Each structure stands twice: as C-alpha cells, then as structure tokens.
Image (spheres, rainbow, N blue to C red):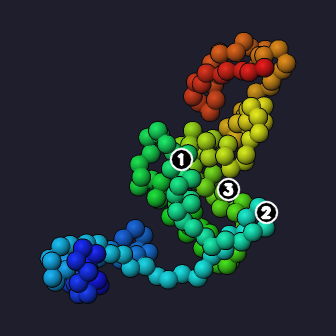
Amino acid sequence: MRCPFCNHPESKVVDSRSSGEGLAIRRRRECLACERRFTTFERIEEEPLIIIKKDGRREPFNREKIVNGLRKACEKRPLSFETVEMIANIVEQEIRKRNENEIPSSVVGELIMEKLKETDEVAYVRFASVYRQFKDLDIFMRELETLLGTKKMRNSGGSINGESPGRFEQVRGKKRSVTCFS
C-alpha cells in the first residue's frame, strides 16, 4: 500500500482487526521508508445501488448523503458522531437486505425517520420537516401532531382543546409547552 505521507510504494501491516459489524477490516500500516503510520479499511465491493428520486431521476446510492442529513437533523442534540454513523450503517444494511438494485428515495427517507424516532424525537421532527417539505406552519403543526401521536384539536380562537396557548400538555409521558399560532 502506497504511503500517503512520502508516497513510498511499500508498507507493512502493524495491526489488523474487524471494524463495525464485520463489514470491514481496519488495518494500521507503517511505511517502510518514512516509518509513519496510517490506517486503511478493506471492505467488500458491493453491487451498485441506485436510488430512484421523487422526480424519477436515478442516481448512485451515496451513504454520505444519509450521514449529512442525519448530522443536520442531530445538530446541537446530545447524539454522538458514532450514533449518527450507526444509524447510517443500519439504514444502509436494511436497504441492501432488500436485494434490489433500485430503491425509491422514499424508502430511504422512511427508514431514516424510523431510526431517528427511536433515537431522538427532536432530530426526528427536524428531519421530517425537511424530508416532507412542509410549506407553512399549519401543515407543520398538523404533521407534528400526527408524528407524535397526539390528539390535539386546533380551533380558530388560538387555543388547543379549549386551553390557552402556553399551557403544558402531557405528550407521551413528558410535559411539553404548547404554543399556538393563529
């Protein structure tokens, strides 16, 4: 393996171990010329996976798009980079388990939302708001109520279930402040 530091064509393996869930092998290498160490990963070459976009376009599966979307949804949330990577890995594995070469982007989005809902509700709502492309606050609030499984009723008087805005409501066992916009 060529050294990334001095470009020498030979190196030796110092350490080798399975990475993740056995999907890759992580190798620590040492350059025979400059003696600097670097890491390489060996993965199985998988069948190319094509994602069918909403508009019918087809593009190669790009795991980094999943990771980037997750990072944005999880920004300023108490989720580690490892958790984001784990979710991306699980989504990719579930897509590949389908043994289909072409997958609709909607399947990918729903898998991501399912995993985020189990992990962090705020990140889930953030991702859903972008994924489902909410156009205004009313649509967002209706979808939020559906996503969280609440049975709130909105009326034109600016209240929810006859209560004034800002009251606390019990949602899935947690107290949350409810703000209503008219």
Q: Marks 1 and 2: CB-CB under 8 Å?
A: no
> What residue is shown at x 72% (from left), y 12% (from top)?
164
Question: Between 181 and 170, which is closer to the camera in this rendering?
Answer: 181
Q: Position of residue 97 (x, y in %)?
A: 61, 74
- Whole-number angstrom distance, CA of label 1 to CA of label 2: 23 Å
Q: Position of residue 179 (x, y in %)?
A: 67, 21
> What residue is shown at x 76% (from left), y 34% (from top)?
136
Q: Amino acid at mark 2?
A: Asp
Q: Position of residue 86 (x, y in %)?
A: 47, 59
Disc marking residue 55:
2
Instruction: Determine whether, in the image, residue 138 is placed left or right of residue 42.
Output: right
Image quarter of the C terminus? top right
> What residue is shown at x 63% (from left), y 51% (from top)?
113
Residue lying at the far front of the rendered structure: 6
Secondary structure state at the residue bearing disc 3? helix
Q: Position of residue 66 (x, y in %)?
A: 56, 59
> Against 119, is 62 above or below?
below
> Against 16, is 149 above or below?
above
Q: Marks 3 and 1: CB-CB under 8 Å?
A: no
On the question of residue 149 being in view, the answer is no
> What residue is shown at x 44% (from left), y 75% (from top)?
23
Residue lying at the far right of the rendered structure: 156
Please tell me in which quadrant of the rendered image residue 55 appears.
bottom right
Where does label 3 land, which residue? 110
Image quarter of the N terminus? bottom left
Where does label 1 land, which residue? 72
- Whole-number angstrom distance, CA of label 3 to CA of label 1: 17 Å
Please tell me in which quadrant of the rendered image residue 141 appears.
top right
Depth-wise, is mark 2 or mark 3 nearer the camera? 2
- Answer with mark 2 or mark 3, whichever residue precedes in sequence: 2
